[in-house]
Image: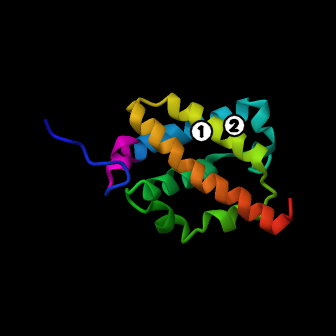
Amino acid sequence: MSQSPAYGVGDASYQAAGGIDGLQRLTDDFYRLMDERPEAAAIRAMHPESLALARDKLACFLSGWLGGPRLFSERYGPISIPSFHAQWPIDQAHSTAWLQCMADAIARQPYAADFAEYLLAQLRVPAARIVQASHSRHGA
């Protein structure tokens, strides 16, 4: 029996997420949940009315972050996630609401259970860094 590559190695995570099509479905579900959930209203308000650009940027970012094509830098240039998000005062409640929308969006995907768990665990790292960067900048 062949062993599939470990998540985080090469493009294994990108492939497990369904490539760019799978990531676009994930981000579509994520932003739909953000629109619907009252607890995400404060985060949603940090975005423009149209989420088309945010959807594309998140899918492109996740592509490279998960070992696939580095679409974000190709389309939008370099990014530092904590620095970019530090322009808004993002606290733990914002981070928790964001992660809950993402957890529920991940749960809607046809991902293997171990990959879904891995992906959410990995997303908690930048989420925590964003709160720290915002706290340093805004003194929240």
Between 50 and 112, the one lying in front of the other is: 112
CA–CA distance between discs 1 and 2?
9 Å
Q: Position of residue 42 (x, y in %)?
A: 81, 43
SS at mark 2 in the image = helix
Answer few, some or many: residues within 10 Å of disc 2's Cα (few below 14, many 20 plus, some between 14 and 19): many
Identify the residue at the far left of this view: 1
Identify the residue at the far bottom of this view: 78
Per the image, is 33 magenta?
Answer: no
Per the image, is 18 magenta?
Answer: yes
Above/below status of 35 relative to 82: above
Q: Earlier in the sequence, mark 1 or mark 2?
A: 2
Please report the residue visible at 42 percent of the width from the left and 53 percent of the height from the top.
66
Contact (Cβ within 8 Å) of mark 1 with mark 2 = no
Answer few, some or many: residues within 10 Å of disc 1's Cα (few below 14, many 20 plus, some between 14 and 19): many
Kindly identify the amino acid type of the residue bearing the numbered disc 1.
Answer: Met
Between 99 and 23, the one lying in front of the other is: 99
Q: Can residue 71 be spotted in the picture?
A: yes
